[in-house]
Amino acid sequence: MTNNIHDIIRQRRSIYPLEFNGQVLDNSIVKQLLEDAHWAPNHYLNLPWHFLVLTGASMHNWLNKVLEIEQVTASSDPKKFNKIDVFKQKISHAIVIVQNTTDHPKAKAFEDALAIGAAVQNMYLGLSAYEHVGGYWSTGLCNNHADMKAHFNLSEQQQMLGYFIIGGVDQKRTASNRASVDAHIQFL
């Protein structure tokens, strides 16, 4: 891995849970990623995030809750159930990303959500320090469903913004076929 920040940004990829190898990672890796997240810019230093780390039994309970909620949904695809079973075997940790309503008088919810997006990007960039660890930000898996919020004992003032799912990988993807930035820039 390179230490050049521009290369690190360009090589950052979402590594999907189906690509994980089932290795259980040391909690110190997750702690380091959360430390990276904590250094994200945020308005008024109100630190609008809260992270719930799931591993082992708590992760399996979460995935079982996803299955329970999905079974009630008439439009559920049977492939989802199989995918969740695979997740149970491949995911090392899942981090529930929670947005707290802050007490700061000038704080705005959308600014806090943007700060949390920056925190997640910091976790992604932090993954570059680990050759065989990948991650994926999922906003699915019954994210912010009332029953899921109850499962995690979240208050009305808290909103789930997804899960950062982490696992061991044999080989990270770094290549991309992204178009040139020039099509998205206009100098005035």
Image (cartoon, rainbow, N blue to C red):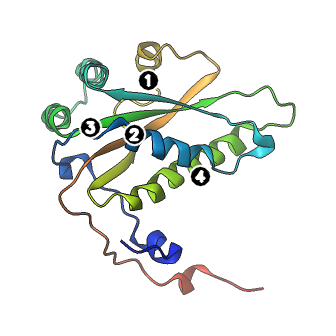
Q: Quadrant of the N terminus?
A: bottom left
For badge 4, the amino acid type reads Ala
What residue sits 26% from the left and 57% below the top? 132
Q: Is residue 130 left or right of residue 32?
A: left
Identify the mark at residue 39; answer none if there is no mark.
none
Q: CA distance from mark 2 to mark 1?
A: 30 Å
| Neighbours of disc 3 within 10 Å: few (<14), some (14-19), many (20+) | many
For badge 2, the amino acid type reads Ser
- The answer to which image quadrant residue 105 occupies is top right
Residue located beneath label 1 in the image: 145
The answer to whether residue 19 is above or below residue 75 is below
Residue located beneath label 3 in the image: 92
Along the polypeptide, which appears first: circle 2 or circle 1?
A: 2
CB within 8 Å, label 3 to label 2: no
Q: Secondary structure at mark 2?
A: helix
Image coordinates for residue 133, horizontal then vertical, percent: 30, 53
The answer to whether residue 53 is above or below residue 17 is above
Identify the mark at residue 118; answer none if there is no mark.
4
| Neighbours of disc 2 within 10 Å: few (<14), some (14-19), many (20+) | few
**Looking at this view, is 60 or 4 the one in front?**
4
Residue located beneath label 2 in the image: 28
Image coordinates for residue 49, horizontal then vertical, percent: 61, 34
